[in-house]
Image (cartoon, rainbow, N blue to C red):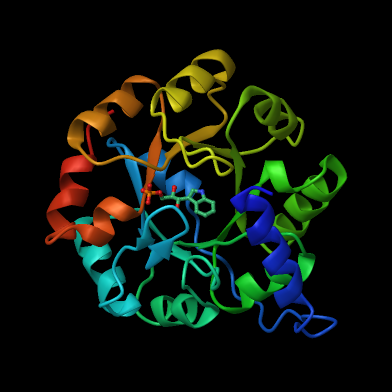
Amino acid sequence: MTILDKIVAEKKETLKEYPEVVERASDRQPIPFKARVEAGDTLGIISEIKRASPSKGDINTGFTPADQALLYVEGGTNAISVLTESDFFKGSMTDLADVRGVVDVPILNKDFIIDERQIVDAYNHGADIILLIVTILDDETLARFHNTARDLGMEVIVEVHDEEEMKRALKLDPEIIGINNRDLKTFLVDLDNTVKLIDKYYDEAILFIAESGMETRADAQKMAGGKARCLLVGETLMRAKHPVEVIGELKVGI
Ligand SMILES: O=P(O)(O)OC[C@@H](O)[C@@H](O)c1c[nH]c2ccccc12
Protein backbone atom coordinates (compact mmCIF):
# COMPACT_ATOMS: atom_id res chain seq x y z
CA MET A 1 0.00 0.00 0.00
CA THR A 2 1.47 3.37 -1.00
CA ILE A 3 1.09 6.45 1.16
CA LEU A 4 -1.35 7.78 -1.41
CA ASP A 5 -3.51 4.66 -0.96
CA LYS A 6 -3.44 5.26 2.80
CA ILE A 7 -4.46 8.90 2.44
CA VAL A 8 -7.35 7.98 0.15
CA ALA A 9 -8.45 5.20 2.52
CA GLU A 10 -8.48 7.66 5.44
CA LYS A 11 -10.39 10.16 3.33
CA LYS A 12 -13.06 7.56 2.65
CA GLU A 13 -13.42 7.06 6.41
CA THR A 14 -13.74 10.81 7.02
CA LEU A 15 -16.39 11.06 4.32
CA LYS A 16 -18.59 8.64 6.27
CA GLU A 17 -19.11 11.48 8.74
CA TYR A 18 -20.13 13.97 6.07
CA PRO A 19 -23.80 14.87 5.70
CA GLU A 20 -25.43 12.84 2.94
CA VAL A 21 -25.90 15.95 0.84
CA VAL A 22 -23.82 19.12 1.01
CA GLU A 23 -25.95 22.00 -0.27
CA ARG A 24 -24.51 25.05 -1.92
CA ALA A 25 -24.73 27.73 0.77
CA SER A 26 -24.52 30.96 -1.26
CA ASP A 27 -24.28 32.35 -4.76
CA ARG A 28 -20.79 33.78 -4.22
CA GLN A 29 -18.91 34.35 -7.48
CA PRO A 30 -15.39 32.83 -7.25
CA ILE A 31 -12.42 35.14 -7.90
CA PRO A 32 -10.71 34.61 -11.28
CA PHE A 33 -7.27 33.04 -11.19
CA LYS A 34 -5.99 31.96 -14.61
CA ALA A 35 -6.81 35.20 -16.40
CA ARG A 36 -5.05 37.24 -13.73
CA VAL A 37 -1.88 35.17 -13.84
CA GLU A 38 -1.81 35.43 -17.64
CA ALA A 39 -2.27 39.18 -17.46
CA GLY A 40 0.96 39.52 -15.46
CA ASP A 41 4.50 39.65 -16.82
CA THR A 42 6.07 37.44 -14.17
CA LEU A 43 5.75 33.80 -13.23
CA GLY A 44 2.58 33.37 -11.17
CA ILE A 45 2.95 32.09 -7.63
CA ILE A 46 0.51 30.03 -5.59
CA SER A 47 1.74 30.08 -1.99
CA GLU A 48 0.67 27.21 0.19
CA ILE A 49 -0.38 26.98 3.83
CA LYS A 50 1.10 23.60 4.86
CA ARG A 51 1.74 22.56 8.47
CA ALA A 52 3.01 19.07 7.89
CA SER A 53 3.29 16.42 5.22
CA PRO A 54 3.69 12.65 5.18
CA SER A 55 7.14 12.98 3.63
CA LYS A 56 8.52 15.72 5.90
CA GLY A 57 6.55 15.39 9.14
CA ASP A 58 5.95 18.74 10.87
CA ILE A 59 7.05 21.63 8.67
CA ASN A 60 5.76 24.58 10.69
CA THR A 61 3.09 24.34 13.35
CA GLY A 62 3.65 27.67 15.10
CA PHE A 63 1.73 30.04 12.82
CA THR A 64 -1.77 31.34 12.25
CA PRO A 65 -3.18 30.64 8.78
CA ALA A 66 -4.66 34.15 8.45
CA ASP A 67 -1.34 35.84 9.34
CA GLN A 68 0.65 33.58 7.04
CA ALA A 69 -1.82 34.29 4.23
CA LEU A 70 -1.44 38.05 4.76
CA LEU A 71 2.34 37.71 4.41
CA TYR A 72 1.81 35.86 1.14
CA VAL A 73 -0.43 38.64 -0.13
CA GLU A 74 2.14 41.23 0.93
CA GLY A 75 4.72 39.30 -1.11
CA GLY A 76 2.49 39.59 -4.18
CA THR A 77 1.24 36.02 -4.41
CA ASN A 78 -1.32 35.35 -7.15
CA ALA A 79 -3.25 32.84 -5.08
CA ILE A 80 -3.10 30.99 -1.78
CA SER A 81 -3.34 27.23 -1.47
CA VAL A 82 -4.76 25.90 1.78
CA LEU A 83 -4.03 22.24 2.42
CA THR A 84 -7.09 21.04 4.31
CA GLU A 85 -6.32 17.32 4.64
CA SER A 86 -6.18 16.59 8.36
CA ASP A 87 -4.69 13.15 9.01
CA PHE A 88 -1.40 13.54 7.14
CA PHE A 89 -1.09 17.28 6.55
CA LYS A 90 -2.71 18.63 9.75
CA GLY A 91 -4.97 21.05 7.88
CA SER A 92 -8.70 21.75 8.12
CA MET A 93 -11.61 23.51 6.43
CA THR A 94 -11.41 26.01 9.29
CA ASP A 95 -7.96 27.03 8.00
CA LEU A 96 -9.56 27.68 4.63
CA ALA A 97 -12.40 29.77 6.06
CA ASP A 98 -9.91 31.71 8.23
CA VAL A 99 -7.83 32.61 5.20
CA ARG A 100 -10.95 33.54 3.22
CA GLY A 101 -11.82 35.93 6.01
CA VAL A 102 -8.71 38.07 5.43
CA VAL A 103 -7.65 37.91 1.77
CA ASP A 104 -9.22 38.70 -1.57
CA VAL A 105 -6.78 36.80 -3.80
CA PRO A 106 -8.06 33.47 -5.18
CA ILE A 107 -7.84 30.49 -2.83
CA LEU A 108 -7.09 26.92 -3.85
CA ASN A 109 -8.56 24.22 -1.65
CA LYS A 110 -5.84 21.60 -1.74
CA ASP A 111 -7.17 18.23 -0.74
CA PHE A 112 -7.67 14.70 -2.00
CA ILE A 113 -11.04 15.00 -3.70
CA ILE A 114 -12.80 11.69 -4.21
CA ASP A 115 -16.40 12.77 -3.57
CA GLU A 116 -18.58 15.48 -5.07
CA ARG A 117 -19.58 16.74 -1.63
CA GLN A 118 -16.00 17.90 -1.04
CA ILE A 119 -16.30 20.23 -4.04
CA VAL A 120 -19.42 21.95 -2.72
CA ASP A 121 -17.83 22.08 0.73
CA ALA A 122 -14.77 23.81 -0.76
CA TYR A 123 -17.04 26.36 -2.44
CA ASN A 124 -18.99 26.91 0.77
CA HIS A 125 -15.78 27.57 2.73
CA GLY A 126 -14.64 30.18 0.23
CA ALA A 127 -12.46 28.34 -2.28
CA ASP A 128 -12.13 29.68 -5.83
CA ILE A 129 -10.07 26.81 -7.21
CA ILE A 130 -9.95 23.08 -6.51
CA LEU A 131 -7.37 20.44 -7.29
CA LEU A 132 -8.29 17.17 -8.97
CA ILE A 133 -5.57 14.53 -8.73
CA VAL A 134 -5.82 12.40 -11.87
CA THR A 135 -4.23 9.29 -10.42
CA ILE A 136 -6.92 8.84 -7.74
CA LEU A 137 -9.93 9.27 -10.09
CA ASP A 138 -11.21 7.30 -13.07
CA ASP A 139 -11.98 9.13 -16.34
CA GLU A 140 -15.72 9.33 -15.79
CA THR A 141 -15.42 10.66 -12.24
CA LEU A 142 -12.72 13.12 -13.24
CA ALA A 143 -14.95 14.57 -15.97
CA ARG A 144 -17.95 14.73 -13.67
CA PHE A 145 -16.02 16.50 -10.87
CA HIS A 146 -14.46 18.88 -13.39
CA ASN A 147 -17.96 19.87 -14.53
CA THR A 148 -19.32 20.16 -11.00
CA ALA A 149 -16.59 22.62 -10.02
CA ARG A 150 -16.99 24.69 -13.16
CA ASP A 151 -20.76 24.80 -12.74
CA LEU A 152 -20.06 26.42 -9.36
CA GLY A 153 -17.83 28.96 -11.12
CA MET A 154 -14.62 27.53 -9.67
CA GLU A 155 -11.45 26.89 -11.66
CA VAL A 156 -9.82 23.46 -11.58
CA ILE A 157 -6.17 22.46 -11.45
CA VAL A 158 -5.93 19.01 -12.99
CA GLU A 159 -2.88 17.42 -11.37
CA VAL A 160 -0.69 14.98 -13.24
CA HIS A 161 2.66 13.40 -12.58
CA ASP A 162 3.46 11.39 -15.69
CA GLU A 163 2.66 11.02 -19.35
CA GLU A 164 -0.17 8.58 -18.97
CA GLU A 165 -1.91 10.96 -16.54
CA MET A 166 -1.21 13.91 -18.84
CA LYS A 167 -3.01 12.14 -21.69
CA ARG A 168 -6.00 11.48 -19.44
CA ALA A 169 -6.02 15.11 -18.24
CA LEU A 170 -5.96 16.47 -21.79
CA LYS A 171 -9.17 14.59 -22.63
CA LEU A 172 -10.98 17.02 -20.28
CA ASP A 173 -10.03 20.00 -22.43
CA PRO A 174 -8.63 21.53 -19.23
CA GLU A 175 -7.77 25.18 -18.69
CA ILE A 176 -5.15 24.52 -16.03
CA ILE A 177 -2.78 21.59 -15.56
CA GLY A 178 -0.56 21.18 -12.50
CA ILE A 179 2.48 18.99 -12.93
CA ASN A 180 3.63 17.55 -9.66
CA ASN A 181 7.41 17.22 -9.43
CA ARG A 182 6.81 14.93 -6.47
CA ASP A 183 5.65 11.38 -7.05
CA LEU A 184 2.88 10.98 -4.45
CA LYS A 185 3.58 7.24 -4.31
CA THR A 186 7.32 7.39 -3.61
CA PHE A 187 7.84 11.07 -2.56
CA LEU A 188 10.72 11.39 -4.99
CA VAL A 189 11.06 14.93 -6.33
CA ASP A 190 12.37 15.68 -9.82
CA LEU A 191 12.14 19.23 -11.17
CA ASP A 192 12.85 17.96 -14.68
CA ASN A 193 9.46 16.29 -14.63
CA THR A 194 7.63 19.57 -15.28
CA VAL A 195 10.07 20.62 -17.97
CA LYS A 196 9.85 17.30 -19.81
CA LEU A 197 6.06 17.03 -19.71
CA ILE A 198 5.41 20.62 -20.79
CA ASP A 199 7.92 20.27 -23.58
CA LYS A 200 6.04 17.31 -24.98
CA TYR A 201 2.46 18.52 -24.41
CA TYR A 202 2.69 22.32 -24.61
CA ASP A 203 -0.56 24.04 -25.52
CA GLU A 204 -0.83 27.81 -25.29
CA ALA A 205 -4.47 27.62 -24.22
CA ILE A 206 -3.47 25.78 -21.04
CA LEU A 207 -1.93 27.34 -17.93
CA PHE A 208 0.82 24.97 -16.80
CA ILE A 209 1.72 25.05 -13.13
CA ALA A 210 4.91 23.50 -11.75
CA GLU A 211 4.20 21.97 -8.35
CA SER A 212 6.46 20.95 -5.45
CA GLY A 213 10.10 20.93 -4.52
CA MET A 214 11.06 24.45 -5.57
CA GLU A 215 13.34 26.45 -3.30
CA THR A 216 15.37 29.05 -5.16
CA ARG A 217 15.19 31.70 -7.84
CA ALA A 218 17.25 29.34 -10.01
CA ASP A 219 14.51 26.72 -9.63
CA ALA A 220 11.90 29.28 -10.66
CA GLN A 221 14.01 30.28 -13.66
CA LYS A 222 14.33 26.67 -14.69
CA MET A 223 10.53 26.23 -14.55
CA ALA A 224 9.92 29.46 -16.47
CA GLY A 225 12.47 28.35 -19.08
CA GLY A 226 10.45 25.15 -19.41
CA LYS A 227 7.32 27.20 -20.13
CA ALA A 228 5.64 26.74 -16.76
CA ARG A 229 3.53 29.90 -16.23
CA CYS A 230 3.03 29.52 -12.48
CA LEU A 231 4.57 27.78 -9.43
CA LEU A 232 2.93 26.10 -6.46
CA VAL A 233 5.23 26.45 -3.45
CA GLY A 234 4.64 25.14 0.05
CA GLU A 235 7.51 24.02 2.26
CA THR A 236 10.00 26.69 1.18
CA LEU A 237 7.57 29.45 2.17
CA MET A 238 6.44 27.74 5.36
CA ARG A 239 10.06 27.46 6.54
CA ALA A 240 11.11 30.92 5.34
CA LYS A 241 11.89 33.63 7.91
CA HIS A 242 10.76 36.22 5.40
CA PRO A 243 8.20 34.71 3.02
CA VAL A 244 7.51 38.16 1.53
CA GLU A 245 11.06 38.32 0.18
CA VAL A 246 11.10 34.72 -0.99
CA ILE A 247 7.96 35.25 -3.09
CA GLY A 248 9.68 38.25 -4.67
CA GLU A 249 12.69 36.09 -5.56
CA LEU A 250 10.51 33.41 -7.14
CA LYS A 251 8.51 35.83 -9.29
CA VAL A 252 10.90 35.81 -12.22
CA GLY A 253 10.08 37.63 -15.44
CA ILE A 254 8.45 35.74 -18.28
O1 LIG B 1 5.88 21.87 -0.22
P1 LIG B 1 6.24 21.83 -1.66
O2 LIG B 1 7.28 20.80 -1.99
O3 LIG B 1 6.58 23.19 -2.20
O4 LIG B 1 4.91 21.36 -2.47
C1 LIG B 1 3.73 22.14 -2.49
C2 LIG B 1 2.62 21.39 -3.24
O5 LIG B 1 3.00 21.24 -4.58
C3 LIG B 1 2.35 20.04 -2.61
O6 LIG B 1 1.91 20.29 -1.32
C4 LIG B 1 1.32 19.21 -3.36
C5 LIG B 1 1.16 19.15 -4.71
N1 LIG B 1 0.14 18.32 -5.02
C6 LIG B 1 -0.36 17.81 -3.90
C7 LIG B 1 -1.44 16.94 -3.71
C8 LIG B 1 -1.77 16.63 -2.42
C9 LIG B 1 -1.05 17.11 -1.33
C10 LIG B 1 0.00 17.99 -1.51
C11 LIG B 1 0.35 18.34 -2.81
Residue 63 to residue 116: above or below: below
Judge from the rendering whether residue 118 lies leftward or rightward of residue 156; answer left or right.
right
> Is residue 200 or residue 112 the one in the foreground?
112
Tell me which residue sits at (24%, 41%) in the image.
215
- Residue 119 in view here: no
Residue 18 to residue 196: above or below: below
- Residue 172 in view here: yes
Judge from the rendering whether residue 35 lies leftward or rightward of residue 16; answer left or right.
left
- Furthest-top residue in view? 200
- Furthest-front residue in view? 1
Judge from the rendering whether residue 109 lies leftward or rightward of residue 145; answer left or right.
left
Tell me which residue sits at (41%, 22%) in the image.
192
> Is residue 70 or residue 184 the one in the foreground?
184
Q: Looking at the rendering, in which quadrant would you find the C terminus?
A: top left
Tell me which residue sits at (77%, 81%) in the image.
23
Q: Quadrant of residue 120?
A: bottom right
Residue 52 to residue 45: above or below: below
> Is residue 232 or residue 193 the one in the foreground?
193
| Residue 203 on image: x %, y % | 57, 22
> Is residue 3 or residue 223 the one in the foreground?
3
Residue 244 to residue 124: above or below: above
Judge from the rendering whether residue 173 lies leftward or rightward of residue 83; answer left or right.
right
| Residue 156 on image: x %, y % | 61, 50
| Residue 173 on image: x %, y % | 71, 34
| Residue 123 on image: x %, y % | 62, 71
Q: How many marks?
A: 0
